[in-house]
Amino acid sequence: MGAYVMWSLWKALVDPPMVASPPAATTTLWHRSPISSVKINVDATFTLPNAAAAAVARDSNGDYLCCSTLYFQASTPLEDEAHAFLLGVQLFQKLQLQHCIIEGDLKQVVDALLSHSNSAPWRIHAIAGQLRGSYFS
């Protein structure tokens, strides 16, 4: 399902004549979060200059809670993925959760957010600083 959602986001960003068919299905394992907790999966897609990000919240049983999407302009996939994390944090706030797991797939963004230094790449420095200062301890 995740592959279909991301393909749909990608399809919305490009000219329909360029879209031939959805990508081949791949097996992706979703790992449930600890009992009584929520996991928010974030991801993004990018086609210069357009970008889309999505965040999906599920409980420890894998049941859907809610989601959020964002369409915007960006100049790199790195910016796009950073916005996806920001979207995940906003979803966390909307759900008024005490704790959750936010999971994304671009290690460079995750490392920048978890770093206690100002070593984030300049393209996401402002987003990383905002998230670190407000949400991470």
Image (tube, rainbow, N blue to C red):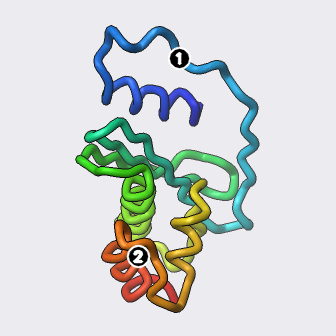
Query: Residue 101, relative to residue 17: is it above or below?
Result: below
At horizontal 36% and vertical 76% (from top left) the residue drawn is: 125
Q: Which residue in the structure is indicated by mark 2? A: 128
How many discs appear?
A: 2
Depth check: 96 or 119 in front? 119
Residue 119 visible to the viewer: yes
Depth check: 106 or 122 in front? 122
Q: Which residue in the structure is indicated by mark 1? A: 22
Depth check: 129 or 76 in front? 76
Secondary structure of residue under mark 1: loop
At horizontal 31% and vertical 39% (from top left) the residue drawn is: 48
Residue 67 visible to the viewer: no
- Residues at discs 1 and 2 in contact (Cβ within 8 Å): no
Q: Is residue 62 left or right of residue 124?
A: right
Q: Give percent across and percent down for residue 120.
A: 46, 77
Secondary structure of residue under mark 2: helix
Q: Give percent across and percent down for residue 65.
A: 49, 51
Q: Is residue 48 left or right of residue 30?
A: left
Residue type of the residue flagged with mark 1: Pro
Query: Residue 121, relative to residue 10: is it above or below?
Result: below
Q: Give percent across and percent down for residue 91.
A: 39, 62
Query: Residue 80, relative to residue 33: is it above or below?
Result: above
Query: Residue 134, relative to residue 46: is it above or below?
Result: below
Depth check: 29 or 35 in front? 29
Callout 1: few (<14), some (14-19), or many (20+) C-alpha neighbours within 10 Å? few
At horizontal 60% and vertical 68% (from top left) the residue drawn is: 101
Q: Which quarter of the picture shows residue 8?
A: top left
Q: Which quarter of the picture shows residue 83?
A: bottom left
Q: Which image quarter holds the N terminus?
A: top right
Q: Is residue 56 left or right of residue 125?
A: right
Mark number for residue 92?
Answer: none
Q: Give percent across and percent down for residue 127.
A: 34, 72
